[in-house]
Image: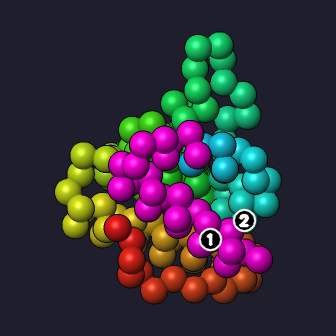
Amino acid sequence: MVQDFFDKLKGLFIRLYKSKAGSSPIFAWTIHDSIEMQDYFGITARVTASPGKDLDDFENYFMDKLFKIIPNSATLSWDDERKGNYGFLINKDSADDTKKGILKRFFNYLVKFVNNEFGIKIEFDGTKLL
């Protein structure tokens, strides 16, 4: 079951970074609609958007706020010192090799997070990211 959620999340990221039209709302709503996905991956997601704003304009935090992503711009950042200071990693305009490397690192962190938090091993070989 967790592997299925992981594979779905990986697919959402791949779609988001391949810049397909309409991918950011799908990304945001899929995460917001899945309490299980939020629980397993330490996701903090905004529940409602204010008038005139879409959920994909807001940050989604992963692994208990170690990483954050803004779906509309596909801007992924991380707080390596856990002090609330997020440093830029990638966005839609980053080079494909850079996106692949950062996403591989992100998913490896996610695999470790799930194993540490729940004792569940999920598989990730690091290929077929983009």
Q: Secondary structure at mark 1?
A: helix
Horizontal side of 55 relative to 129 (left or right) equals: right
Q: Determine which of the numbered discs, if any, sits on residue 6 in the image.
A: 1
Viewer-proximal residue, 8 or 104?
Answer: 8
Quadrant where the image shows the N terminus: bottom right
The answer to which quarter of the image holds residue 80 is: bottom left
Instruction: Name the spot of residue 58 as percent of width and height, x first.
Output: 55, 32
Magenta stretch encompasses residue 52: no
Q: Main secondary structure of the magenta part?
A: helix
Number of marks in picture? 2
Residue type at the position of mark 2: Tyr
Magenta stretch encompasses residue 3: yes
Q: Residues within 10 Å of mark 2 (few under 14, many from 20)?
A: many
Quadrant where the image shows the C terminus: bottom left
Q: Residues within 10 Å of mark 1 (few under 14, many from 20)?
A: many
Say which residue label 2 marks. 40
Instruction: Name the spot of residue 14 as percent of width and height, x first.
Output: 44, 62
Q: Tell me what residue is drawn at x 45 percent, y 66 percent.
A: 106
Q: Earlier in the sequence, mark 2 or mark 1?
A: 1
Horizontal side of 122 relative to 69 (left or right) equals: right
Does 124 appear above or below 21? Answer: below
The answer to which quarter of the image holds residue 29 is: top right
Viewer-proximal residue, 28 or 82?
Answer: 28
